[in-house]
Image (cartoon, rainbow, N blue to C red):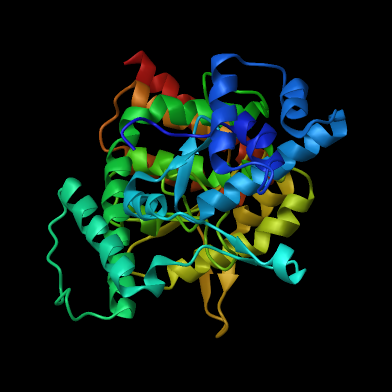
Amino acid sequence: MGRKQYIGFGEFKSIVQTTCPPNFSACEVAKKIQEIRKKPIKEKTLIKSVRGIDIEETSLRSLQDYADMNLRYLKATGLFVNYSHGITPNPLKLGVFERFLEEQQYFISDFRQNKTNQCFGFPMFYDNLDEAKKLYIAQVKQAGIQGISYVIPFDIKTVSKDVIKKEYDRLYLKCFEQKEQQFALDQANKWQEISQYMEILIKGQKKETNGLRIPSDMKPAYFEWIIWRSILAIDSLVNSPEQVRKFKIDADFLPIFTAPGGTADLVAEFKDYRLAVEVTLSESSRQEAMEGEPVRRHVADLCQKRDIPTFGLFLARKVHTNTAETFRHGLWYYDDDSPVDLKIVPFSLEEFKNLFDWLFENKIENKAQKLRILLESCLQGKDSLTAPEWKKKMKETIKNQILVSNSL
């Protein structure tokens, strides 16, 4: 696997998912992909050459929808990562693919023999002790390549396959966490890309922009992911990157799903304060009904720790005035009727982007502390303002900070 091996989105949509055994072998599918890379042809012509039939526009759209879903399933296994809107093998799982390549038969179907529609999938390597050992040793080598200090904690000759599986999973997680730490450290250098993703969300762009693209059905997940990256770029975190995010990512650090309910989307721990971040694509009057209570509850739960001050940051493409009014009051009562004054600041994504860009364009030091100062400035005097006045004040606070800094 020396060269970059991948399947593009169009190739998967038009060839891979339109062919299946026994009519086409894996080698024949690979050969067809190689042929179209040498001489690209139109999508309809390609599918007709593979399947021997014409296809309608509605069917083309269905193929695209299925390709989105199927690729997501493949990436969710952890075996594959994104590559040019397609997939490529996860470099941290090379040992698995080496084991696959040694096998002669991937799927065993008894459809023709017993007339039943059953398919027995590929047996997992952990089902065989010798195979499990080989896969584990491959992961040990991967850890060595990454420079991870690791000592095999058992006698490889006498260990059981269940113990090997558990240790393999632990070691893979260790390799992944190291990669995620490296990813986090690099985000400050990627601030312009992060800003461009924000711009795509703000404008609702559907096509690829400067090589960047947000799948239409993944916008909520990408919203959380973009803000996670922005927090990593701001840096000064006390908690680890995986502790900040509450959503799952694939091996290429792209989002798989949105954060589950019951907690804030993101929780960033800094030296002297905690930041709970909630995002939404909702913009209508339903925004307050959907987000008002959960956001306040999540921030209130974090306030119970009482070790450091907790702030809430609510982000939407457009903050509805009724949502701002709910956060302006900010008082929450616990089950014992004791109150807590919540510090929740609602920003539009454009306002946050302007602030984010300013932090990096002006090479502001201690960005996390500057963010706290701005949040506190936005919260000052909110009780004496109406919701529209408060929204206007927050916008002007960011604008004035940028103008003052640029004039120095």
Using the rendered image of the protein, determine whether residue 258 is visible from the camera's viewpoint.
yes
Choose between 384 and 206: the one closer to the eye. 206
Q: Residue at x 19, y 53 (%)?
A: 141
Q: Quadrant of residue 107?
A: bottom right
Q: Quadrant of residue 175?
A: bottom left
Exactly how many numbered labels are in the figure? 0
Horizontal and vertical percent position of residue 365: 25, 32
For the N terminus, give its image quadrant.
Answer: top left
Task: Judge whether 42 appears above or below 24 on screen.
Answer: above
Query: Residue 213 vs residue 357: left or right?
Result: right
- Residue occupying the far bottom of the picture: 336
Q: Quadrant of residue 204?
A: top right
Query: Residue 262 vs residue 241: left or right?
Result: right
Q: Residue at x 42, y 34 (%)?
A: 5
Horizontal and vertical percent position of residue 403: 43, 20
Q: Residue at x 71, y 31 (%)?
A: 50
Choose between 387 and 186: the one closer to the eye. 186
Query: Residue 279 vs residue 186: left or right?
Result: right
Horizontal and vertical percent position of residue 261: 60, 65
